[in-house]
Image: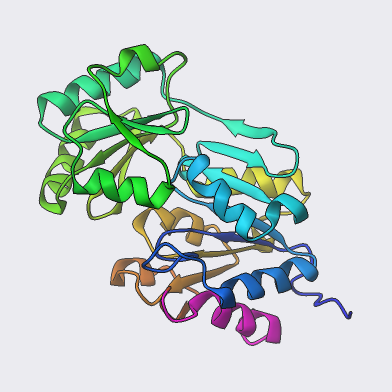
């Protein structure tokens, strides 16, 4: 096989929801074939998502990254794992004290929110439709508990607010004003991400690039959400899905078809052919 020299040794980073998976949370067969072609041509694959590690690993297995290698960038970059070795390249958490402080503030302000523990979604609120959606996204169960404190030993990688979009928009501004030492942003209209300061997909991808003796000129990223913007801006080629908002599309080198219309395979064909590079 003649190697595609442009693709060889490039890092391809894929957001998951709304990008790599379709509206039914399924990886299309066309997407699997296209990513396998990248692997065959010497590319490095990164799955970069706000999801927890357990919510990403089964998709990595579908793509056979447990066989061919790659990286999982979970919690929006708070945890980076080498799939083959299982080694955590990077792991950054909110402290236990900060986690409890945020939890108290969100509780007092009536925002439904969750944390993750041992592959389970925990909440002190009633389990609503948005938490059910998070269950489906990550393929893990949820559980209502009286308090988060017994489950926080060394802190957490991320807290997630999940409520109706109006409530999330209102709380995003309030939380940003109250806490200037954490990252706060939406990944979907009904998800509010709360992470340690400086945690972005872009920063964890730079660590992966450095470990491979590469730089951002070798990074090609795919995304659709507000939490993908830093990653897109840090990339040599930024591919945005047609299902993304107009704000996210402003950060695209190219716009591909939607996640339901073979958008990933279409873009990879364009890159492989040299049309998009």
Nearer to me, 5 or 15: 15
Q: What residue lies at 47% left-to-right and 58% top-to-bottom?
A: 16
Residue 183 sits above or below residue 205 on the image: above
Magenta segment boundaries in residue numbering: 260-277
Residue 273 part of the magenta-drawn span: yes
Name the main secondary structure of what is drawn in magenta. helix
Nearer to me, 179 or 107: 107
Asked if one can make out residue 43 in the rendered structure from this viewpoint, the answer is yes
Query: Residue 189 sits in which quadrant?
Result: bottom left
Residue 218 sits above or below residue 99 on the image: below
Query: Residue 46 sits in which quadrant?
Result: bottom right
Q: How is the image coloured?
A: rainbow
Residue 175 in the figure: left or right of residue 81 = left
**Looking at the picture, how far across and down is residue 123, in whole percent?**
26, 29
**Looking at the picture, how far across and down is residue 229, in whole percent?**
42, 58
Q: What residue lies at 68% left-to-right and 44% top-to-bottom?
A: 83
Nearer to me, 257 or 250: 257
**Looking at the picture, how far across and down is residue 35, in whole percent?**
65, 69
Asked if one can make out residue 69 in the rendered structure from this viewpoint, the answer is no
Nearer to me, 23 or 3: 23
Residue lying at the far right in this picture: please name it.
1
**Looking at the picture, how far across and down is residue 122, in whole percent?**
32, 29
Q: Quadrant of the N terminus?
A: bottom right
Q: What residue lies at 38% left-to-right and 17% top-to-bottom?
A: 151
Q: Quadrant of the C terminus?
A: bottom right
Residue 191 part of the magenta-drawn span: no
Q: What residue lies at 40% left-to-right and 65% top-to-bottom?
A: 18
């Amino acid at each position: 096989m003649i190697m595609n020299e442009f693709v060889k040794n490039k890092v391809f980073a894929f957001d998951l929801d709304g990008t790599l998976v379709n509206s039914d949370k399924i990886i299309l067969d066309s997407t699997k074939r296209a990513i396998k072609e990248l692997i065959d041509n010497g590319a490095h694959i990164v799955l970069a998502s706000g999801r927890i590690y357990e919510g990403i690993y089964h998709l990595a297995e579908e793509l056979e990254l447990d066989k061919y290698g790659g990286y999982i960038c979970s919690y929006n970059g708070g945890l980076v794992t080498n799939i083959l070795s299982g080694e955590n390249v990077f792991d950054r958490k909110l402290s236990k004290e900060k986690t409890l402080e945020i939890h108290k503030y969100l509780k007092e302000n009536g925002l439904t929110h969750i944390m993750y523990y041992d592959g389970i979604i925990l909440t002190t609120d009633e389990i609503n439709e948005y938490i059910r959606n998070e269950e489906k996204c990550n393929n893990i169960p949820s559980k209502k508990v009286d308090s988060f404190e017994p489950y926080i030993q060394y802190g957490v990688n991320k807290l997630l607010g999940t409520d109706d979009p109006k409530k999330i928009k209102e709380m995003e501004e309030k939380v940003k004003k109250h806490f200037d030492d954490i990252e706060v942003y939406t990944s979907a209209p009904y998800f509010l991400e709360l992470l340690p300061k400086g945690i972005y997909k872009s920063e964890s991808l730079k660590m992966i690039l450095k470990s491979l003796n590469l730089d951002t000129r070798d990074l090609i990223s795919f995304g659709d959400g507000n939490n993908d913007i830093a990653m897109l801006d840090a990339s040599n080629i930024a591919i945005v899905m047609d299902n993304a908002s107009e704000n996210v599309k402003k950060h695209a080198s190219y716009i591909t078809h939607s996640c339901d219309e073979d958008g990933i395979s279409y873009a990879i064909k364009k890159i492989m052919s040299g049309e998009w590079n």
